[in-house]
Image (spheres, rainbow, N blue to C red):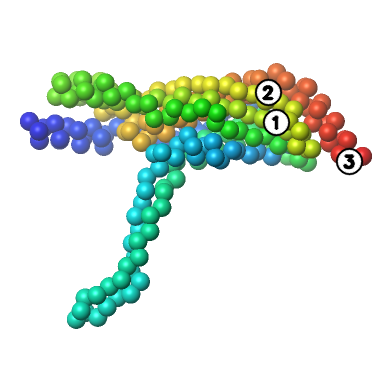
Amino acid sequence: MKKIILFISTIFMFSSCVTMRLQDVSPKEKNSVMLPTLTPHVDIKSFENTYYHLQPVFVESYPLFFGSDIWGVGVTETREYAGADPRIQDAITIFLKDVKDNITNPYGEKQGDIMCRITFGDVDSRGIGWMFLSALTLYIPNLFGMPMMSNRADLELEVQIFDINKKIIGRYTANCSDKKYVALYWGSNYPNAARRANAAAFMCAMKKIKKQINHDAPELIKKLNAAKSKKTE
């Protein structure tokens, strides 16, 4: 019985079909009123604090000195370093694309800055009830499409806009959640489900923020232009 469960679990883990795609990190909704050119920034510490605890630690060893074949003596050096969580780059990519394609005019003279930080993140909430149910039913329902696990991401973002004098002229917040399932013939495997849930939640929160910025766009443009004119006087 254990061999059967192990066999089904192995097939399950390698059979999920949906992986990360370019469209998962490519926001589409463009604001109707585009702001002047702004330089995008991220508060990288807030991103690292959100995802850091899942960063794997890699161990790398390589020889420094090889002894003779007679003695078989060798000296190696071992280093440990944290691997970057790919969800950090996914989130940064979404923000940069949104700024350059959907919020601002990417061409022209810079008139300020726009910065994103994660103010709250619960990105590793796992629905493991499916796993217990799968084990109790010997994974048979999974063969017919029942999920084995779910991954949920909850994010709150803050976006600040600064004029060319580094004065804040706009602050916007929004939160969003998304859930992806780990399943045999659909959904994703665990790492991809976590990435896709995070990307979808981040993109959703940015969509809400874009609507707020679009609403305030005339006033923001006015303030950006006024600061630029005052600086050139």
Q: Which residue is mark 3?
A: 232
Which residue is at the front of the view, 145 or 227? 227
Which residue is at the front of the view, 124 or 40? 124
Give the crowd class for mark 3: few <14, some 14-19, many >=20 residues within 10 Å. few
Residue found 71% across the figure and 26% down from its top: 170
Type of amino acid at the residue the image marks with label 1: Ile
Q: Which residue is mark 2?
A: 213
Cβ atoms at labels 2 and 1 below 8 Å apart: yes
Quarter of the image for residue 1 reads top left
Q: Position of residue 133 (x, y in %)?
A: 21, 20
Type of amino acid at the residue the image marks with label 3: Thr
Q: CA distance from mark 3 to mark 1?
A: 20 Å
Type of amino acid at the residue the image marks with label 2: Ile
Q: CA distance from mark 2 to mark 1?
A: 9 Å
Which residue is at the far right? 233
Q: CA distance from mark 3 to mark 2?
A: 26 Å
Quarter of the image for residue 43 reads top right
